[in-house]
Image (cartoon, helix red, strand yellow):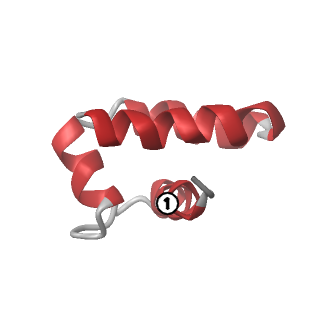
Amino acid sequence: MRELDQLMLRFLDQRWPKADDAERSVFLRLLESEDDKLWRWCMGRERPEDPELHALVERIIALPH
């Protein structure tokens, strides 16, 4: 999904260079999720049960375009 790719690339461009090892680890775990789950999470239709993943999704959504 192109929109999902754009969100992930936005994180990589804006946040990854400043991210600590813990945040990078959570992002890599997020990428292991199925695309349809990622899409529902990023669109606010569902939320990850894992609080770290949920917090990261929220940060990704909040990044400026």
The N terminus is located in which quarter?
top left
Comparing 37 with 65, the one in front is 65
Farthest front residue in view: 65
Comparing 13 with 52, the one in front is 13
Q: Position of residue 28 (x, y in %)?
A: 51, 30
Comparing 12 with 28, the one in front is 12
Farthest left residue in view: 36
Task: Find residue 24 and report its image quarter.
Answer: top right
Q: Secondary structure at mark 1?
A: helix
Q: Position of residue 62 (x, y in %)?
A: 57, 64
* Location of residue 40 with respect to 44 vertically, above or below: above
Q: Is residue 10 left or right of residue 16?
A: left
Q: Position of residue 40 (x, y in %)?
A: 22, 57
* Location of residue 38 with respect to 44 vertically, above or below: above
Count of marks overlaid on the render: 1
Q: Residue at x 46, y 62 (%)?
A: 54
Crowd band around label 1 with a 10 angstrom C-alpha radius: few (<14), some (14–19), many (20+)? some
- The amino acid type, in three-letter code, at marker 1 is Ile
Q: Residue at x 51, y 64 (%)?
A: 58
Q: Residue at x 31, y 66 (%)?
A: 47
| Residue under label 1 | 61
Q: Is residue 52 left or right of residue 49?
A: right
Q: Position of residue 20 (x, y in %)?
A: 80, 39
* Location of residue 50 with respect to 24 vertically, above or below: below
Task: Find residue 19 and report its image quarter.
Answer: top right
Q: Residue at x 75, y 33 (%)?
A: 21
